[in-house]
Image (cartoon, rainbow, N blue to C red):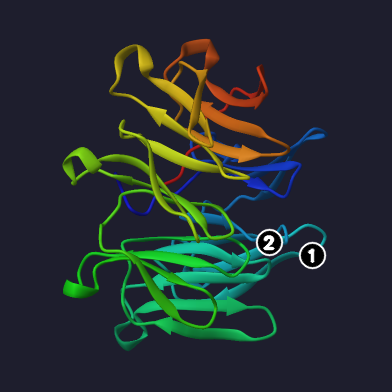
């Protein structure tokens, strides 16, 4: 599994989806979907997309000359460029604060934060394997190339503390001081674990998922592809599991009020983007989202 997974399907606030298309000619670019329909917000194709807690969309472009770099989009305001350097990864650190990782800028490599009105500041010079932010100022990162410093670290806005020496594959924030991780290199310790400040670690599954996404309120969803009849989408709430669907999606994101958005490419007339609300499935597009 890649540490830096780029989604072509993202939630924007509680009532919109952001989708990227690359195979539809004049339809290519970034689109916004809500119950009122679809609207195109850019014909440029991004390399990465993230959403800040205040409803802003942050993207990176690498194929547009002087337009390359990091851009922010907001309804009613449009696009604004906030940086020319191209990061390896991004995460929403706070409602209006972004954290990025750089590996190609010499002494500028490492972790940086950006906040409107304040600008850029370097948070650390180490380069993480992956990172997840809570959207409320908490950041967790994993290091595997720093010897005794390897493992999972947390930053609370003022300083760093080490949470674990194990190196995980997936990392998803579930709430304040709470996250889920997957391990693949620790024998009987492999699988999915959750961590809560003041409580510690607990293993909630021994199966290794292909994808893991937070739903909020301590809940998360995963996809499995290597477990026969167990393959598909599953939801976990406090250690209790329920199967959501047997089809294996390409993209899976929470959105709205306890809803999921998924996309499929291997199910014929079922391909496209679907809205999952409780036990109800609604197809909202036959186009298949994709990123470069």
Q: Disc 2 versus disc 1: distance between alpha carbons?
A: 7 Å
Q: Are marks 2 and 1 in contact (CB under 8 Å)?
A: yes
Q: Residues within 10 Å of mark 1 (few under 14, many from 20)?
A: few
Dividing the picture into quarters, in which one does residue 286 lie?
A: top right
In the image shown, does 26 or 217 lie closer to the viewer?
Answer: 217
Q: Secondary structure at mark 1?
A: loop
Q: Secondary structure at mark 2?
A: strand
Q: Residue at x 50, y 29 (%)?
A: 240
Give the x, y percent position of residue 9: 56, 41
Q: Is residue 145 left or right of residue 248?
A: left
Q: Residue at x 48, y 34 (%)?
A: 239
Q: Residue at x 39, y 81 (%)?
A: 124
Give the x, y percent position of residue 248: 43, 23
Q: Is residue 229 left or right of residue 30?
A: left
- Give above or below for 228 relative to 136: above
- Give above or below for 45 relative to 114: above
Q: Residue at x 48, y 52 (%)?
A: 179
The answer to whether residue 265 is visible is: no
Q: Residues within 10 Å of mark 2 (few under 14, many from 20)?
A: some
In the image shown, does 126 or 172 lie closer to the viewer?
Answer: 172
In the image shown, does 114 or 133 lie closer to the viewer?
Answer: 133
- Give above or below for 11 relative to 153: above
Q: Quadrant of the N terminus?
A: top left
Q: Which residue position is annotated with label 1?
A: 77
**Label for residue 146?**
none
Q: Which residue position is annotated with label 2?
A: 73
Give the x, y percent position of residue 191: 30, 38
Q: Is residue 206 left or right of residue 238?
A: left
Dividing the picture into quarters, in which one does residue 145 lie?
A: bottom left
Q: Residue furthest front?
A: 199
């Amino acid at each position: 599994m890649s540490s830096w997974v780029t989604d072509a399907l993202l939630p924007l606030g509680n009532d919109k989806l952001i989708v990227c298309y690359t195979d539809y000619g004049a339809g290519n670019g970034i689109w916004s979907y809500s119950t009122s329909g679809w609207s195109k917000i850019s014909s440029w194709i991004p390399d990465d997309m993230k959403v800040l807690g205040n409803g802003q969309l942050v993207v990176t472009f690498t194929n547009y000359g002087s337009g390359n770099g990091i851009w922010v989009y907001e309804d009613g305001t449009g696009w604004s460029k906030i940086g020319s350097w191209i990061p390896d990864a991004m995460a929403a650190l706070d409602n209006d604060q972004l954290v990025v990782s750089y590996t190609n800028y010499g002494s500028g490599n490492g972790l940086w934060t950006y906040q409107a009105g304040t600008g850029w500041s370097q948070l650390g010079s180490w380069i993480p394997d992956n990172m997840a932010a809570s959207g409320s100022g908490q950041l967790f990162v994993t290091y595997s190339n720093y010897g005794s410093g390897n493992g999972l670290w947390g930053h609370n806005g003022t300083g760093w503390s080490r949470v674990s020496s194990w190196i995980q594959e997936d990392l998803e924030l579930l709430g304040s001081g709470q996250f889920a991780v997957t391990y693949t290199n620790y024998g009987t310790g492999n699988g999915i674990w959750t961590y809560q400040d003041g409580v510690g670690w607990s293993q909630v599954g021994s199966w290794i998922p292909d994808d893991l996404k937070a739903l909020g309120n301590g809940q998360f969803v995963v996809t499995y592809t290597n477990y026969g009849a167990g393959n598909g989408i599953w939801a976990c709430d406090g250690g209790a599991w329920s199967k959501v669907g047997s089809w294996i999606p390409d993209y899976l994101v929470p959105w709205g009020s306890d809803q999921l958005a998924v996309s499929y490419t291997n199910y014929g007339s079922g391909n496209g983007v679907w809205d999952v609300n409780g036990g109800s499935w609604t197809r909202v597009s036959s186009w298949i989202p994709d990123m470069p």
